[in-house]
Image (tube, grey):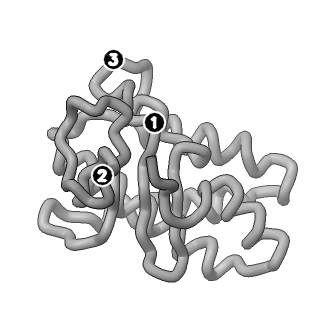
Amino acid sequence: MKKCPGERLCEFVAAKFYANQMQQLNCALEEVGHCLAQFHYRYGNEQHGDFQPSNIYYEEKTKVVTFIDVGGMGVPTMGTDVDHFHQCVRAMTASYQVNLHAELLRAFDKGYQSASPDSKRVISVHFDDPKLPTDGCHGCPHALL
């Protein structure tokens, strides 16, 4: 199976934070929020089930967002993808800087709220289940939104 483009969001956040590239970091989080909303529109508000920075890849040059570990999609959870992502970002950034999570989540929420069903951003969803639909791209099981 081919590797997803970009790097895991958790690693991207660390690299950009320590390079003091907050503008790029905020742009990425806004893009992720927008893509999650598109995902919810496309799949009837089904939840990813484990939406966290380690299950998201981000390619900065092309702004392609890839969601992985989608095998739990549709399984009932205690909260929403947005809630879970908020909790994970708070935990992930706790040792970086006080209130870093607030800035990142503000960007994420802005992107999520700005999306509409007809948005045309590039997102790929890597399905763990080979029985689910693919777009045939490189033989990887994912769907481009």
On the image, which quarter does residue 26 sit in?
Answer: bottom right
Mark 1 = which residue? 69
Q: Could you tell me which residue is drawn at 19 percent across and 55 percent down?
A: 135
Dot 2: within a 10 Å radius of its alpha carbon, few (fewer than 14), some, or many (20 or more) residues? few
- Residue 107 can be seen, yes or no: no
Residue in the foreground of this view, choosing between 93 and 127: 127
Q: Which mark is residue 16?
A: none
The amino acid on which the numbered mark 1 sits, given as a three-letter code, is: Asp
Q: Could you tell me which residue is drawn at 76 percent across and 68 percent down?
A: 15
Q: Position of residue 96 (x, y in %)?
A: 84, 57
Q: Earlier in the sequence, mark 3 or mark 1?
A: 1
Mark 2 = which residue? 139
Instruction: Reply above or below: 20 against 58.
Output: below
User: What separation in Å lies between label 2 and label 3 (alpha carbons)?
Assistant: 30 Å
Question: For this view, does 64 lie left or right of residue 6?
Answer: left
Element on which disc 1 rests: loop
Q: Earlier in the sequence, mark 2 or mark 3?
A: 3
User: What separation in Å lies between label 1 and label 2 (alpha carbons)?
Assistant: 17 Å
**Marks 2 and 3: which is nearer the front?**
2
Q: Which mark is residue 76?
A: 3
The reply to whether the C-beta atoms of the residues labelled 3 and 1 are less than 8 Å apart is no
Q: Could you tell me which residue is drawn at 45 percent across and 61 percent down?
A: 32
Element on which disc 2 rests: helix
Element on which disc 3 rests: loop
**Marks 3 and 1: which is nearer the front?**
1
- Residue 19 can be seen, yes or no: yes
Q: Position of residue 142 (x, y in %)?
A: 30, 49
The amino acid on which the numbered mark 2 sits, given as a three-letter code, is: Gly
The amino acid on which the numbered mark 3 sits, given as a three-letter code, is: Pro
